[in-house]
Image: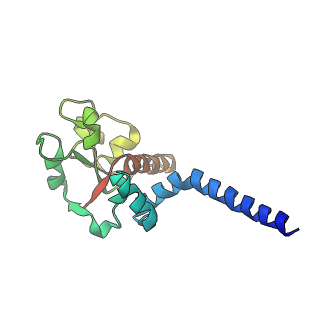
């Protein structure tokens, strides 16, 4: 009977481990967005294996660079020595890796160096929507805003906060 119980315990542990392995990307994303650091063993693993986005994930908003709208405007891609940044949901993300979209002359360049929560949430290219004003959003739009901000926070490094 002891052998059967041990087998059942190992199968249970293996099952829980498999569930955690499948769910880990979502758990890690929530940790990144919330500002809670990933457990140190995972941070060390990512750092050793070249995933600098996970290793350099910010611990909290107090450790992020603070940007005014005027400062953010300098990071619009016109100066090749600076990264391309944009603000969404009050956080500043580095979209330099998406230069083919956000670089000068590209389709979404109008968002570079700007606070554009409204436009990105509405999937709008209208210059009047390039702002962080979402005061008139209904519940459905607020949900879309949450999904859009999570997408950007997961895809691009969060490097600052808008003040």
- Which residue sits furthest right? 1
Rendered image quadrant of residue 109:
top left
Most extreme residue toward the front is 3
Which image quadrant: the C terminus? Answer: bottom left
Residue 63 picture location, percent across and down: 28, 68
Q: Residue 24: x percent and y percent?
A: 53, 55
Q: How is the image coloured?
A: rainbow
Query: Can you say which quadrant of the picture contains the N terminus?
Result: bottom right
Q: Using residue 111 as the reference point, say whether residue 53 is left or right of it.
A: right
Q: Nearer the viewer, residue 37 or 15?
A: 15
Q: In the figure, is residue 34 to the left or right of 56? A: right
Residue 116 image position (x, y, % from top left): 30, 46
Count numbered badges in the picture: 0
Please report the residue visible at 63 percent of the width from the left and 53 percent of the height from the top. 18
Near-viewer residue (23 or 103):
23
Residue at figure coordinates x 72%, y 62% from the top left: 10
Q: Residue at coordinates 27% horizontally, 39% vertically from top-left?
A: 128
Image: 121 above or below 53: above
Q: Residue at point 75% right, 65% down?
A: 9
Q: Is residue 9 left or right of residue 62?
A: right
Q: Nearer the viewer, residue 148 or 127?
A: 148
Q: Position of residue 88 (x, y in %)?
A: 33, 50
34 lies above or below 53: below
């Amino acid at each position: 009977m002891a052998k059967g119980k041990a087998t059942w315990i190992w199968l249970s542990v293996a099952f829980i481990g498999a569930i955690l392995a499948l769910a880990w990307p979502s758990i890690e994303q929530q940790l990144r967005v919330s500002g809670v650091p990933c457990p140190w063993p995972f941070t060390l693993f990512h750092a050793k294996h070249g995933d600098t986005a996970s290793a350099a994930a910010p611990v909290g908003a107090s450790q992020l660079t603070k940007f005014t709208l005027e400062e953010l405007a300098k990071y619009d891609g016109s100066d090749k020595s600076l990264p391309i940044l944009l603000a969404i949901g009050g956080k500043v993300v580095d979209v330099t890796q998406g230069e083919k979209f956000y670089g000068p002359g590209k389709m979404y360049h109008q968002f570079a160096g700007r606070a554009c929560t409204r436009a990105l949430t509405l999937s709008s290219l209208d210059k009047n929507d390039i702002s962080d004003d979402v005061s008139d959003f209904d519940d459905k739009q607020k949900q879309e805003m949450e999904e859009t901000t999570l997408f950007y926070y997961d895809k691009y490094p969060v490097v600052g906060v808008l003040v």
